[in-house]
Image (tube, grey):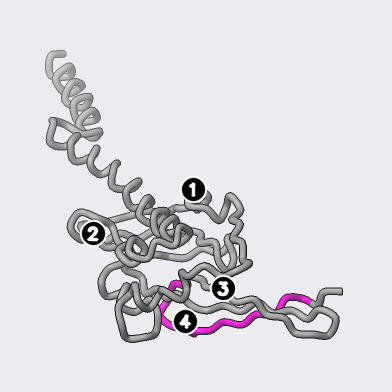
Amino acid sequence: MMQAIRGGLAAVAMVLCLGGCGARASATSSAGRREGPAIAHAVRQTLADYIRRDLSAFCADFTPEVAAHLVRVESTCEADLTPAFAPHPGQEEIYAPSERPNGLRISHVRWRGIIAHLTSTWPWPDIRKTVKLRLQRIHGRWLIATPTHVVEERLCNRVFGKLSCRTFYGVRFGVRVPPLIVSMEPNQQ
């Protein structure tokens, strides 16, 4: 009988320890629980910096290798992005709730050491499209390590037979991204 009780207690102790035994295990798991939100925050902060047109903060949201190639000109990140971040006269920017940082849907967050991966929406060109991002922790901060490009985008349409184009800039993720993207809206009456 005593052996059965000891065996039962050992099984209960083993089940309880699977949830984490000792201060060391719980400290590690609580740090791990904080890592996921920190990774998601890094992506949301990048979008916030872009919307605010904060050049230095936006450039600092990427690993140095990625920041050096955000624009296909060989210079500094901030100098290259100045035309894209300059206000355009008569152009008003309005963002839908899904296009704002808190509107991003972030899922499949996983990390090992200093490398993280996640799936996220990104507002432009299509908020429903998801992108797979890689992040790297450098000096305690999560930075986007996926090849990224700020590209000039032109949205054109024909109004009364005349072609009219609007230029804006967008953030595209991936290795092969053309520096200029032109798209046509359906014919407008």
Which comes before the other along the chain, label 1 or label 2? 1
The secondary structure type at the circle numbered 3 is strand
Q: Position of residue 82 (x, y in %)?
A: 41, 74
Amino acid at dot 1: Asn
Separation of marks 4 and 3 at Cα, in angstroms: 16 Å
Amino acid at dot 3: Phe
Q: Nearer the viewer, mark 3 or mark 2?
A: 3
Which comes before the other along the chain, label 4 or label 1? 1
Image quadrant of residue 184? bottom right
The residue tagged 1 is 102
Which comes before the other along the chain, label 3 or label 1? 1
The secondary structure type at the circle numbered 4 is loop
The residue tagged 4 is 177
The residue tagged 2 is 137
Q: Which residues are magenta?
A: 172-186
Residues under numbered marks 4 and 1 in contact, where contact means CB atoms less than 8 Å apart: no
Image quadrant of residue 176? bottom left
Q: Position of residue 36 (x, y in %)?
A: 33, 48
Separation of marks 4 and 1 at Cα, in angstroms: 26 Å
Amino acid at dot 2: Arg
Residue at (48% x, 52% y) in the render = 101
Which comes before the other along the chain, label 4 or label 3? 3
Number of other residues with Cα within 10 Å of mark 1, as a class: few under 14, some 14 to 19, many 20 or more: some
Q: State the quadrant of the C terminus.
A: bottom right
Residue at (24% x, 30% y) in the render = 15
Separation of marks 1 and 2 at Cα, in angstroms: 22 Å
Residue 173 shown in magenta: yes
Residues under numbered marks 3 and 2 in contact, where contact means CB atoms less than 8 Å apart: no
Residue 35 shown in magenta: no
Q: State the quadrant of the N terminus.
A: top left
Q: Is residue 146 left or right of residue 171?
A: left
